[in-house]
Amino acid sequence: MLVDEFDVAVIGGGHAGIEAALASARMGAKTVLFTLNADNIGQMSCNPAIGGIAKGIVVREIDALGGEMGKAIDNTGIQFKMLNTRKGKAVQSPRAQADKKRYREYMKKVCEGQENLYIKQDEVIDIVLGSDNEVVAVKTKLGIEYKVKAVVVTTGTFLNGLIYIGDKTFPAGRAWEPRSEGLAEFYRRHGFPLLRFKTGTPARLDSRTIDYSVLERAPGDDPPPKFSFWTEPLGSYWFEPGKEQVDCWITYTTPKTHEIISKNLHRTALYGGLIKGVGPRYCPSIEDKVVKFPDKARHTVFLEPEGLDTIEVYPNGLSTSLPEEIQWELYRSIPGLERVELIRPAYAIEYDVVPPTELYPTLETKKIRGLFHAGNFNGTTGYEEAAGQGIVAGINAALRALGREPIYLRRDESYIGVMIDDLTTKGVLEPYRLFTSRSEFRLYLRQDNAILRLAKLGHGLGLLNDEQFNLVKEIEGEIERWKEFYKREKVSVAVGEGIRSYTVATLFTADYTIEDLKEKFGYSVPEHPYVKEELEIELKYEPYIERERKLNEKLKRLEDIRIPEDMDYSKVHGLTNEAREKLSKMKPLTVGQAARIDGITPAAVTALLIYLGKLE
Ligand code: FAD
């Protein structure tokens, strides 16, 4: 029974679904968000934290595009840190502990208050296609049909989810929540391959039974970094000093912990052979760590509070699929946890994933027009990766529904672009997580300049308003003016026995700071904290960024050469069979993407350029 009509339907109220739905609605598309439980919109399935290496940069990119994750964590975070401060600025990244309940409530409220966005608690079990193989409607479990022009699927760990605790197994999408099933049949019917991936989560501990006196304290930073350019103080990435924060705590596994695991390995769902799905290499279970690193005497465990109004504590680093009775033994073998009580047991979960090579970099499927995928359903792991894909899928679903041209993010402008390009061209053999090392542009793709890199795009899409964009332009202009000034001005510096003259700008490459300019040379310096910080970083990194930029330029030329969607590779002379096969399968949209496909050699790229008439 057809009851209503929307431009865009988003299936899933997780981190991908929220950003997709908000972006779509904010761009003026009438949007419906389906979720299995409306109270759990924005639920953090695993760790109570947002950000981390590379991931924190993604959150700031989402913010620069007008997304919500950064604002949500700034409003509900209880501890904030900048990671990697001993290393260069290029690999630093913010991370925050969240109050899980408040984060979820914040996201639900934002979705409820969003104009053009409608929330429905229901399971979507089918997607109806029109005669042109395009999306025309979605169908729910109760037989209701909604007419739509585009659909974003973000089912996370819910599609055919199966939970494992030792030899016990039961169907669920996440800790005792019902799973979804119907959509798998839709994908099978339309010839999409389905993979099985797995992930796991530790038990939640009762804080009252932890002996904090023997633990190492891990406090937040002061001043703490924030994620959104738009939370107070506006136009900066730092909170004011003195923000109230809570502590995390550090402990370590012991030889006894490792012995318990080794003795019971056969009872874990994975090593016992029950789980067939592929797990995340970079978020391994404690049994994985003990097996893979037998020489390591101890593994670090972070004890992270799940919120301000709860006694639940998340022991980061202790995910396991051992039976519950062994979990008790294992946790109690760790200093500070000798008398610990478990509130919720650890578990592993296996779920369905559609390979992301089925997608264009716009995140639309190659097989069905108007069908977009984002989040864990694409084989990624992590809230931030999910949200980064979600905003791109939501933007493009809205553009599709509104009859406008799609957008895609390039590798040389954002980590979101790096991730989506990796996913759609290389595919996934195991859950994909972002790292700075995945980018060849990491000196430029920093946490501090996300707003400068992406605000123009966000504003062009209508996701940042004029006032916000004008502030960014003003700041950008000020940075440029100071840069020009420092490049013109010359100073004399004692070097060895002599005196040498340098431009002021050059001093930054020799580790002088803005404060040194003022104190040692009497120069005036910017007042605005963001301008000050950014100016120093940009001038310090400029020679290196210049080198990187030249490389970018070369790649951009390839990047911008489009390949027609209906390209017939059998007509391209000089391609090997392997290259022909891979290009036909992957359908890259640009020569730049084609060049990055595993097995596509420079000779194949030359053949493509000749065929497209683009060889200079
Ligand atoms: P989810 O947050 O899972 O949201 C999916 C949404 O889809 C839900 O709202 C659900 O109700 C809805 N839904 C599903 N099917 C339907 C349907 N047919 N109709 C309507 N609604 C539907 N990440 C890490 O980075 N590190 C980890 O160690 C880690 N461990 C994890 C452990 C466990 C046990 C779980 C469950 C997840 C773990 N994650 C981990 C993954 C993390 O939770 C996800 O990366 C993130 O939540 C993905 O966001 P998402 O939006 O793709 O999906």
Image (cartoon, rainbow, N blue to C red):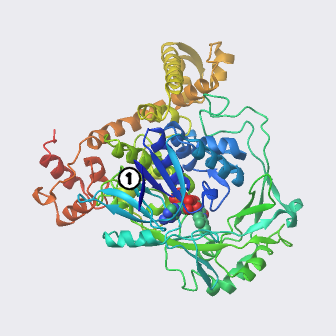
The quarter of the picture where residue 290 lies is: bottom right
Look at the numbered disc 1 and give the secondary structure of its residue.
loop
In the picture, measured across the screen, residue 251 lies left or right of residue 186, that is right
**Residue 338: percent from left, percent from top:** 85, 72
Q: Determine if the C-beta at disc 1 is less than 8 A from ligand 1.
A: no
Residue 321 to residue 300: above or below: below
Can residue 554 be seen here? The reply is yes
Q: Is residue 381 visible?
A: no
Three-letter residue code for mark 1: Val
Q: Quadrant of ligand 1?
A: bottom right
Residue at 65%, 45% (x, y): give it.
73
Q: Is residue 142 above or below residue 517?
A: below
Q: Which residue is mark 1?
A: 148
Q: Is residue 588 left or right of residue 257?
A: left
**At 64% across and 86% down in the image, what residue appears?**
267
- Based on the displayed image, in which of its 4 quarters is residue 129 positioned? bottom left
Q: Quadrant of the N terminus?
A: bottom left
Q: Which of 331/97 is in front? A: 97
Q: Who's the residue at 45% across and 52% down the image?
A: 438
Picture residue at 50% right of the left edge, 16% below the top: 481
Q: Could you tell whether 33 is left or right of 590 in the image?
A: right
Q: Quick one: quadrant of the C terminus?
A: top left
In this view, 2 is above or below 518: below
Picture coordinates of residue 182, whole percent (x, y): 44, 71
